[in-house]
Amino acid sequence: MSLNDSLANVLSHIDNYEKLGKKEVITQNNSKLIRGVLEIMNKQGLIGGFEEVKETNGKKLTVNLLGTLNKCGVIKPRHRISVDDYKKFEKRYLPALDFGVIIISTNKGLMTHQEAKKQNLGGTLISYAY
């Protein structure tokens, strides 16, 4: 069985294991986008960190959980936004002002919506976490 969205699968596993109170998640999926999103979540203090584990059937990711994550998920469809649209999507995906992050793919790489606002960049919405 093939997956349509591997990032959605990883974030769903992280969200479910966080709700169960687990301390670690091992995911089958591993890509540059997934590692980039996890690095941003780690910098924001939402997850403890992650590492690649080589096994016989490929590389897996082991994600350490801190118990501080309330919700995370992908944004589908991936909207293209300009600098003026950030407020609208913050209201849609985040529960309160300055609480949580929206991860955006810009021409300068993956970054949070706060960083993109400071640099006056638009981009494509990827995921949210709070």
Image (spheres, rainbow, N blue to C red):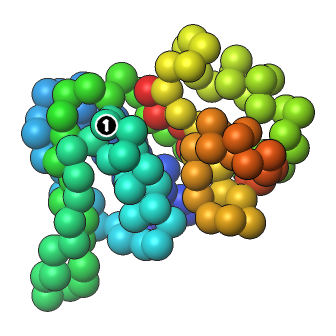
Please say if 51 is above or below 100: below
* Quadrant the C terminus occupies: top left
Quarter of the view holding residue 58? bottom left
How many dots with numbers? Answer: 1
**Residue 121 visible in the picture:** yes
User: Could you say whether the residue bearing mark 1 is in a helix, strand or loop?
Assistant: loop
* In the image: residue 1, left or right of residue 17: right
x, y percentage for residue 46?
Answer: 32, 36
* Quadrant the N terminus occupies: bottom left
Q: Which residue is mark 1?
A: 45
Furthest residue to the front?
A: 118
Please say if 36 is above or below 63: below
Which residue is at the front of the view, 25 or 65? 65
Which residue is at the front of the view, 84 or 92? 84
x, y percentage for residue 43?
Answer: 37, 46
* In the image: residue 84, left or right of residue 113: right
Dot 1 alpha-carbon crowd within 10 angstroms: few under 14, some 14 to 19, many 20 or more: some
x, y percentage for residue 67?
Answer: 20, 28
Furthest residue to the bottom?
A: 56
Please say if 95 is above or below 117: above
x, y percentage for residue 66?
Answer: 18, 34
Q: Residue at x 49, y 27 (%)?
A: 100
Furthest residue to the top?
A: 96
Which residue is at the front of the view, 28 or 36? 36
Please say if 115 is above or below 38: above
Q: Residue at x 24, y 32 (%)?
A: 18
* In the image: residue 58, left or right of residue 102: left
* In the image: residue 75, left or right of residue 32: right
Q: Residue at x 46, y 72 (%)?
A: 32
Q: Residue at x 60, y 14 (%)?
A: 97
Quarter of the view holding residue 96? top right
Kind of residue at disc 1: Gly
